[in-house]
Amino acid sequence: MIPELGHFAAILGLASALGVAITAFWGAFNAQDSWANMAIRLAKLQFVVLAIAFLLLVASFLQDDFSVLYVANNSNTELPWYYKISAVWGAHEGSFLLWTLVTASWTLAVALRSKHLPLELHSYVLGSMGFLNTAFLTFMLASSNPFVRLVPNVPLQGADLNPVLQDPGLIIHPPMLYIGYIGFAVAFSFGIAALCTGKLDSAWARWTRPWVNAAWVFLTVGIALGSWWAYYELGWGGWWFWDPVENASFMPWLAGTALIHSLAATEKRGAFKNWTILLALLTFSLCLIGAFLVRSGVLTSVHAFAVDPQRGLFLLGILVVVTGGALYLYSVRASTIRSRIQYWGISRELLLLMNNALLVLAVVTIMLGTLYPLGYEWFTGGDTMSVGGPYFNRMFIPLMIVLSFFLALAPIARWKTTPKELIMRGLILLAGSAIVSLILPWIFWSSFNFGVSCALALALWIAITHVNSLWKQRHSLTMGNLGMATAHLGFAMAIVGVAVTSAFSLERDARLTPGQSLDVNGKTYELAEVTRSQGQNYIADQATFNVDGRLEMHPERRNYPIRQTITTEAAIKPGFFKDTYISLGEPIANGSWGVRIQEKPLVRWIWLGAFIMGAAAVVACLDKRYRRLSRRDLLAHATSQ
Amino acid sequence: MTPRQTRLLLACPLIAFAALSFVLAIGFNLGRHDIHPSSLLGRSLPQFELTTLLESQSVSNEQVIGKARLMNIWASWCVACRAEHNVLKQIAEANEISLIGINYKDARGDAVAWLYELGNPFEFNIVDANGDLGVDLGVYGAPETFLVDPNGIIRYKHVGPLTEKDWLEEIRPLLATLQ
């Protein structure tokens, strides 16, 4: 009964999503309040019924109802209750139900938070959101229904959740990503609304910016969590693999970052209007492309969901309709939106333009690297190849170095044009940072690496220019500027983390029998013993390491019998300046074990930097000018072209 | 810029996206080849020397050749196999083709208990405990089903649970052409 009710609620969700689309667009065409109000009510209904559908699927999982195919394939009576809940989004069907619920939540947020926007704009945004969820729900109900029953032969036991997904990090990583992805659907819808109404002014940009920031926060935190999870769960100490699915989440992040910056120029100076709309459309399209890549089986990856040809074709259809339709609208309507501004030399406009150019170039680079194997397979008639980390690193790192250079100038530069003395002073600071950065690695890691010095110099420079400007504004600081500076400081922190941990990590592989020890970087790691223990749904071999006789660390190898999978649970001693990372490998003959010991300096700075960026975007959202919806804005928007 | 040039410029994203969709569509088709490796179709059954599940007798590809067979990869740990089992029983009852099971990466006791519980539509079951035969057949996971003609040539491959529709609309007509 519960799955049937859930199925029914999902169908109601589809009906209300379609209702939102129709009433909102109708309201927009005819400028009628009553239709627009109807759309708001339907958006509320859509959220409620989809939340019910989702909770009913959760209930099926908690009750171990293996008559539901999706539950039988992804759960097990032995699974702890919290993983039964997270198993709801552990595979394709359930995660897509979550996806539609997230879409409904954003739609609801737009319906409630933007009521005071001009009727036409608000209705177009809502209509576009309703249309998107109509497409998603049709897809889910037609080809990925999580409520399908497995009768009459109901299995007594389920196939268990994939063990690598049995981890607290994985409980929140996917929802965060989805909230981020679909948050950009709001920006997309604002873009569509601007194209339909032909009105794009600074008021429009001011209304759009908080939504973009909010989506970006979730995507940033989601990606950082994923990277962190890979670091401690996959057991190799890697934190980024340029895996196609990671790329699928990273491309919208880069485009979204570009969008945040181009919106700033559009709001403050009326610049780059067409470009801003295009970015809003592209960012969400990249999210959809990501969903297609992950869920269609086009690319093989650790993350990829089950392969089903019908699904892939359907998703490709959604992508073509949504993105193709939006870009067609763009090609027809964008010429009605004009921006005429002038700027000279090093100005904020130029820096923002450079930011956008570099980020979009990064997106294109990653897209090429991700899709190149497909093209190769096609041209050679079946040969496969993979573009690995080296390509991405070689292309991506130089772009980020140039980006950091322009980023450091951000607080120095002014709109329109910047006095030469200011820039000269900035460049002198860079020279100072460079000299310090040549010395610092010697002091901390007693070695030299050109890349690290480069990153340190730029990060230091970014820190100096931004802290300096914060100090100067200390009496008149707006939340917007505070957020901007903090985000840039977080970025600086992340690039230092990336550079140092990539260059100065130590790694030793050894074969140890209990009682033996290994010296790494002046520390003694003694393997004391390996014991076997029983977890709730796995058997573990747990090693005990004595580090310098003071600290005990316990790496594990877990065997999940139901899925016949082995996972490595690394032992990590986290530190602000250095992580110690021990993973237990294969048992080798006569009682010895393969062991990998790693020291990873500043690895935490990567995620810390990302979380600071996320927090900074929240701060920026709190700026007063987003809270006040001034009469002047509404008037200006009403008369603008 | 003339209006014409502007319009052309603004259409660039659309054109780029069309190209991208094309690449994705190609990739998607390649992905499908992966699941239905055409390389195996038309090839002979790989050679093997294994034992049967219930009788514990040795069995090789020689015993399979001679008549048309429907070979089904299954395992007691495979939930989808349970779902497709009724379909296999119906096919066996129709008595139009001989079914052979390949018990894939399974514990013997569990596999035997499974057949007693759900019934045994197979003429015999080949034990592929290590999955070696599965690798030679290019198996992605259980269940998968192969149609092998009397000469031991693989004619058809189905990934995932077999449905009545697959049997009626694809396998049965193909079988008719073999006889």
Image (spheres, coloured by chain):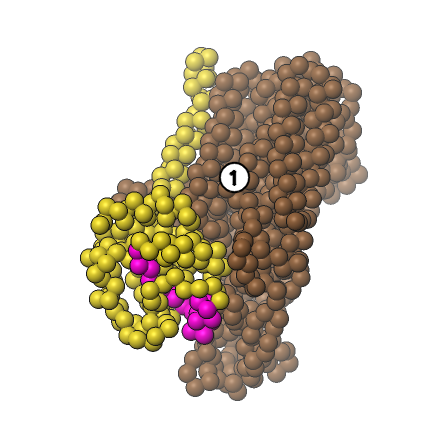
Chain colours: A brown, B yellow
Give the farthest residue toward the front.
B94
Tell me if A218 is positioned left or right of A591 in this view: right
Label 1 sits on residue: A142
Q: Which residues are magenta?
A: B97-116
Q: Say if the magenta span includes residue B101.
A: yes
Residue A102 appears anywhere in the view: no
Residue A321 appears anywhere in the view: yes
Q: Position of residue B151 (x, y in %)?
A: 19, 57
Which of B77/A256 is in front? B77
Q: Quadrant of residue A258?
A: top right
Mark 1 falls within which chain?
A
Q: Quadrant of the C terminus of chain A?
A: top right
Q: Is residue B122 above or below residue A321?
A: below
> Residue at coordinates 74% horizontally, 19% vertically from top-left?
A34
Q: Quadrant of residue A171?
A: bottom right
> Residue at coordinates 46% horizontally, 33% vertically from top-left?
A317
